[in-house]
């Protein structure tokens, strides 16, 4: 009898233990389901001021839409005099229409979060910084690929002005005018050429010009495209003087604050699960999970459960970063990534793909964080965690350079806000990463020159805007980047054309340098050294004899203008004497009155090269090697060979287009964006 009772007791105990283990297993299954990322179902709906309606033309007839109604493919919105018309998509995406605008709705894919629109007339402001949607905006002859940017698109009488207000975008020229059933990417067959728009720049596209000259446009390099489509910095005074633009900026700011507050509240409400990695509840959770795994026969479920448990460490790191406890946060992140890598060795690529998607989501969740925010540092750390997770994959190089552009935008942020110390730290960090990427991937970059060209273009844009960057050290690094780009180009006419473009831009920098110094924004020694450095770099570029003739007249007059300014900077009597004027500009005007002696371009170049050498300004790293004297197979591409008449039609000398197959046009590459989640 005792043996029977003992056996019954043991059975009861085992059943109780099994029940407890089953309960623990069920707990983890439910916990996984509740903490997994749930993607919002996105709707494309119209939002209007209270009590207002807007006309929508649909196949079934014209209708007056109220706020909250859903849009569908083929709808045509006609705002008329109605203000405040907004299309809302993917939770935090907005397309705002100005009065007297007409917008056609194309793709509405609410499952895959893909949307396309055609702006027929008027103005549209796209806010896609916090959305997880992919968007196309078609205009006459082109399509805007906005990525994660904030953009203004204007379409009036066949002319489109496209401006990237925040982050970067791409404007692509089309072989036909159809929107199609799939979103376009930069490598889509329908796209014949494209232009990169760094933050703060704009282009103008004439639809008739594109349609009449598609075969020509397809062959143009960036240095030609920027001239044909009026690539330039946007006049930011319009953001103040234009009431509708000012209103959009205000709405963007309010939206960022709301999103920031909402997401921060989520992080803070979630709190800290583990006080430390040695906390008792951390070890208890590990034990319960091990028991649950023993009772789970599906390896896939075990793998997902183990990976899901790691995200508690990531969430704790978010909370700790928000409260400035960086060391503790770093400890959590190191445990998180280390344990994840061990799981990948056990369970393979399927689990890793899940991890990559989740890390990307958590990175995107911090899209509201800007330099100065407590979580901006965590955003930077997660960026590296994400890059580590995709190392070796085909898209890794594109994403690395996309993140690099983000760091350059941070440089612009500090320059715009006069934060000199942070500016230097960010700029030095950017250059260090640029060189590191270059060294690690130089063999691949010969076939991916667009990645370097766009970095140089984005840097050009910053140097044309911010006097804070006019310091000797910054310019030395800037010249390294553009020289490295030129040195990677093949020795053909394309390279010669790019060199002409670089010389022209360096003269633009000289113009800016003179203005910024006379405005009192650049120290004297930096102005002297930058002037000498730019002249020295322009002079050391060697071109074949035929090209020298072609460009001499183009650049000589511009360069000679700086002879007087150079002599002024060298005149201690004028630059530092209050008797000659209260400001640098007044002293320069006095100097021009007192000094009429002219200096030739050759004398000026010799003087600047000598000054650069004496000042130790020469450098070898990334220096452009001399070009060989080659015989071009067609005349040099210069200003006179591309002619635009009063109607905007392009005429190009035939032998420029009928070039040798050896001329390698750099094919633009789409840099994939990391899409923010709602």
Image: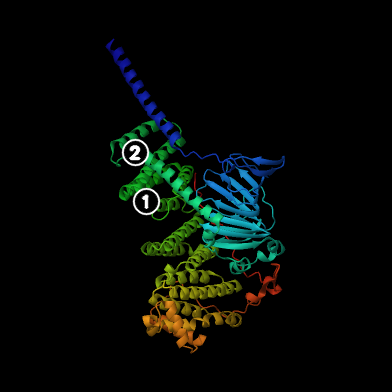
Q: Quadrant of residue 498?
A: bottom right
Q: Looking at the image, is mark 2 or mark 1 nearer the viewer? A: 1
Residue 412 horizontal/vertical position (percent): 45, 62
- Taking the image as shown, residue 262 lies to the left or right of residue 137, namely left
Q: Classify 10 Å Cα crowding around label 1: few (below 14), some (14-19), many (20 and above).
A: some
Q: Classify 10 Å Cα crowding around label 2: few (below 14), some (14-19), many (20 and above).
A: some
Image quadrant occupied by the N terminus: top left
Residue 405 horizontal/vertical position (percent): 48, 59
On screen, residue 604 above or below 526: below
- Taking the image as shown, residue 74 lies to the left or right of residue 92, namely right
Which residue shows up at 39% across the image and 81% down it? 575
Sequence-earlier tag: 2 or 1: 2
Residue, disc 2: 273
Residue 237 horizontal/vertical position (percent): 52, 63
- Residue sitting nearer the eye, 141 or 188: 141
Q: Is residue 667 visible?
A: no
Q: Is disc 1 placed on a helix, strand or loop?
A: loop
Q: Which mark is residue 161?
A: none
Residue 337 horizontal/vertical position (percent): 39, 47
Q: Quadrant of residue 427?
A: bottom left
């Amino acid at each position: 009898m005792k043996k029977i009772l003992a056996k019954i007791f043991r059975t009861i105990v085992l059943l109780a233990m099994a029940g407890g283990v089953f309960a623990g297993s069920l707990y983890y299954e439910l916990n996984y389901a509740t903490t997994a990322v749930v993607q919002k179902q996105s709707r494309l709906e119209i939002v209007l001021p209270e009590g207002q309606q807007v006309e929508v033309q649909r196949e079934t007839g014209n209708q007056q839409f109220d706020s909250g109604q859903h849009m569908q493919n083929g709808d045509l919105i006609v705002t008329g005099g109605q203000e405040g018309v907004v299309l809302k998509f993917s939770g935090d995406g907005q397309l705002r229409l100005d009065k007297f605008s007409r917008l056609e709705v194309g793709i509405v894919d609410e499952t895959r979060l893909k949307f396309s629109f055609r702006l027929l007339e008027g103005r549209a402001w796209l806010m896609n910084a916090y959305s997880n949607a992919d968007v196309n905006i078609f205009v006459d002859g082109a399509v805007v690929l906005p990525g994660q940017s904030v953009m203004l698109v204007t379409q009036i009488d066949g002319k489109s002005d496209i401006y990237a207000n925040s982050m970067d975008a791409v404007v692509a020229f089309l072989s036909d005018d159809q929107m199609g059933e799939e979103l376009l990417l930069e490598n889509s067959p329908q796209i014949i050429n494209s232009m990169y728009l760094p933050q703060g720049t704009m282009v103008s596209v004439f639809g008739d010009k594109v349609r009449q000259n598609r075969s020509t446009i397809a062959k143009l390099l960036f240095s030609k495209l920027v001239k044909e489509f009026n690539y330039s910095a946007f006049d930011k005074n319009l953001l103040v003087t234009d009431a509708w633009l000012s209103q959009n900026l205000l709405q963007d700011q309010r939206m960022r604050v709301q999103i920031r507050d909402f997401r921060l509240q989520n992080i803070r409400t979630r709190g800290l699960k583990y006080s430390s990695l040695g906390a008792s509840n951390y070890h208890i959770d590990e034990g319960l999970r091990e028991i649950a795994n023993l009772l789970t026969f599906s390896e896939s479920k075990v793998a997902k459960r183990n990976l899901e448990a790691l995200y508690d460490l990531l969430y704790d790191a978010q909370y700790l970063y928000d409260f400035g406890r960086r060391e503790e946060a770093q400890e959590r992140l190191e445990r998180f990534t280390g344990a994840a890598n061990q799981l990948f060795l056990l369970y393979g690529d399927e689990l890793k793909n899940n991890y990559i998607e989740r890390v990307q989501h958590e990175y995107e969740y911090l899209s509201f964080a800007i330099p100065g925010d407590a979580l901006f540092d965590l955003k930077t750390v997660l960026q590296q965690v994400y890059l580590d997770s995709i190392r070796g994959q085909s898209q890794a190089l594109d994403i690395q350079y996309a993140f690099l552009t983000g760091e350059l935008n941070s440089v612009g942020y500090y320059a715009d806000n006069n934060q000199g110390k942070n500016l230097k730290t960010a700029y030095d960090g950017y250059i260090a990463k640029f060189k590191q990427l270059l060294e690690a991937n130089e063999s691949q970059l010969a076939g991916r020159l667009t990645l370097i060209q766009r970095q140089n273009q984005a840097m050009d844009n910053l140097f044309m805007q911010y006097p804070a960057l006019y310091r000797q050290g910054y310019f030395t690094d800037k010249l390294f980047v553009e020289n490295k780009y030129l040195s990677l180009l093949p020795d053909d006419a394309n390279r010669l054309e790019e060199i002409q473009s670089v010389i022209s831009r360096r003269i633009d920098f000289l113009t800016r340098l003179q203005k910024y110094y006379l405005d009192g924004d650049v120290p004297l020694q930096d102005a002297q050294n930058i002037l000498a450095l730019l002249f020295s770099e322009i002079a050391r570029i060697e071109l074949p004899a035929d090209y020298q003739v072609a460009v001499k007249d183009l650049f000589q007059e511009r360069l000679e203008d700086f002879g007087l300014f150079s002599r002024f900077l060298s005149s201690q009597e004028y630059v530092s004497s209050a008797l000659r004027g209260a400001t640098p500009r007044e002293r320069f005007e006095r100097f021009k009155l007192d000094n009429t002696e002219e200096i030739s371009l050759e004398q000026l170049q010799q003087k600047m090269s000598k000054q650069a050498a004496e000042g130790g300004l020469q450098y070898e790293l990334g220096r452009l090697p001399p070009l060989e004297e080659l015989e071009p197979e067609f005349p040099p591409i210069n200003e006179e060979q591309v002619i635009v008449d009063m109607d905007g039609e392009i005429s190009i000398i035939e032998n420029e287009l009928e070039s040798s197959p050896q001329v390698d046009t750099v094919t633009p590459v789409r840099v994939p964006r990391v899409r923010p989640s709602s």
